[in-house]
């Protein structure tokens, strides 16, 4: 049995777990993250030094969950500020809460800034089939041709479609790509984060779009998309949006790097979605006059 203390916990998760006695079971075990299913949410227990994210508990120390012999689907009890299992107990009773959602009024970036963002991603991003499709780079694989066609159709639709129509078209890609979270899902999550930031009152519509495709993709992606539809992502993504809104060049550069470095290509695919969403917001504002 390993007993560990948490240093940080997302504020909303802390509030929702306070005083609760409930059960959660293992979804997946990785070297630095233990993913636990809790109702329609996913609790990520992450090793020390991990970036803040939605529904996350960050430990005080560096650990390797793969060494703990935690069984697939193992059941944990959440009670009295701790997550307790046969092989592991995580005490989060004294963990400091961190807040993700920042209630600010975002300004719409101009065309020059959008072009600079796209250029940065093109030059510094990690290539994937979705990346190649968005930037119109030739790729011979079936997946590459698929994304080349889908990105073209999405860009054309963005010129006239309203947000709900565009999201429904986007959701048809859900589950496409490789990796722990498929590229299409990372892209869609980036778009949803932007849409929520600029139009938070339409949260129910975003959640409805996500609910319609939950069974099309892997579980971890489903939870990620559900959080993005509520404006909840990784701290670097939200800080990047704030820096873009403030036209803070040093902040933009810093957080572009931080978002890009998440996962293998997930960060780049998310950045592409965020820029696509920002461009759509800008062009929609121009159409309104």
Image: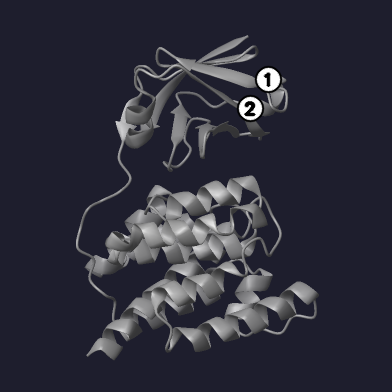
Q: Do the residues labelled 1 and 2 touch (CB within 8 Å)?
A: yes
Q: Mark 1 points at which residue?
A: 68
Identify the disc placed on residue 109. Answer: none
199 with respect to 83 (left or right): left
Q: Could you say whether the residue bearing mark 1 is in a helix, strand or loop? A: helix
Residue found at the far right of this picture: 141
Above or below: residue 118 compared with residue 92? below
Q: Quadrant of the C terminus?
A: bottom left
Q: How far apart are marks 1 and 2 (CA)?
A: 7 Å
Residue 78 image offset from top left, x and y in percent: 48, 18
Location of the N terminus by quadrant is: top right
Residue at 40% from the left image edge and 74% from the top image edge: 163
Q: In which quarter of the image is residue 195?
A: bottom left
**Picture coordinates of residue 115 (x, y %)?**
40, 83
Dot 1 crowding, Cα within 10 Å, few <14, some 14–19, many 20+: some
> Quick one: 217 or 4, which is closer to the camera?
217
* Placement of 222 over or under 57, stated as above or below: below
Task: Return the residue found at the far left.
Answer: 105
The disc label shown at residue 64, or none: 2
Q: Is residue 196 left or right of residue 124?
A: left
> Which residue is rendered at x = 43% and y = 42% of the image?
54
Q: Give the percent coordinates (x, y) of residue 269.
A: 56, 65
- Residues 189 and 262: in front is 189
Mark 2 crowd level (few <14, some 14–19, many ≥20, 10 Å Cα):
some
| Point 52% across, 71% down: residue | 168
* Residue 107 seen in the figure: yes
Tell me the mark number nearer the camera, choosing from 1 and 2: 1
What percent of the width, then of the height, locates residue 130?
Answer: 63, 72
Q: In this view, does 260 lie to the left or right of 8?
A: right
Furthest residue in direction top, as rendered: 1
Asked if residue 135 can be seen in this view, the reply is no
């Amino acid at each position: 049995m390993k007993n560990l203390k948490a240093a940080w916990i997302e504020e909303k998760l802390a509030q929702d777990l306070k005083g609760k006695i409930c059960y959660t079971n293992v979804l997946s075990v990785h070297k630095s993250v233990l993913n636990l299913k809790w109702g329609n949410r996913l609790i990520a227990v992450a090793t020390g030094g991990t970036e803040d994210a939605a529904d996350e508990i960050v430990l005080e120390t560096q650990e390797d969950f793969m060494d703990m012999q935690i069984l697939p689907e193992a059941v944990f009890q959440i009670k009295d500020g701790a997550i307790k299992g046969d092989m592991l107990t995580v005490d989060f009773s004294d963990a400091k809460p961190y807040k993700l959602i920042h209630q600010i009024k975002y300004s719409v970036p101009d065309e020059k800034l959008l072009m600079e963002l796209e250029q940065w991603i093109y030059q510094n991003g990690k290539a994937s089939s979705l990346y190649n499709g968005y930037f119109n780079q030739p790729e011979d694989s079936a997946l590459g041709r698929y994304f080349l066609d889908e990105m073209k159709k999405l860009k054309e639709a963005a010129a006239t479609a309203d947000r709900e129509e565009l999201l429904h078209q986007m959701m048809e890609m859900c589950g496409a790509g490789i990796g722990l979270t498929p590229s299409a899902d990372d892209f869609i999550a980036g778009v949803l984060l932007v849409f929520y930031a600029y139009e938070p009152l339409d949260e129910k519509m975003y959640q409805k779009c996500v609910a319609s495709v939950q069974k099309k993709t892997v579980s971890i992606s489903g939870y990620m998309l559900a959080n993005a539809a509520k404006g909840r992502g990784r701290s670097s993504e939200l800080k990047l949006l704030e820096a873009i809104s403030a036209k803070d060049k040093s902040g933009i550069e810093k957080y572009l790097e931080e978002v890009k470095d998440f996962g293998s290509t997930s960060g780049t695919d998310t950045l592409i979605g965020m820029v696509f969403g920002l461009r759509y917001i800008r062009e929609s504002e121009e159409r309104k006059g």
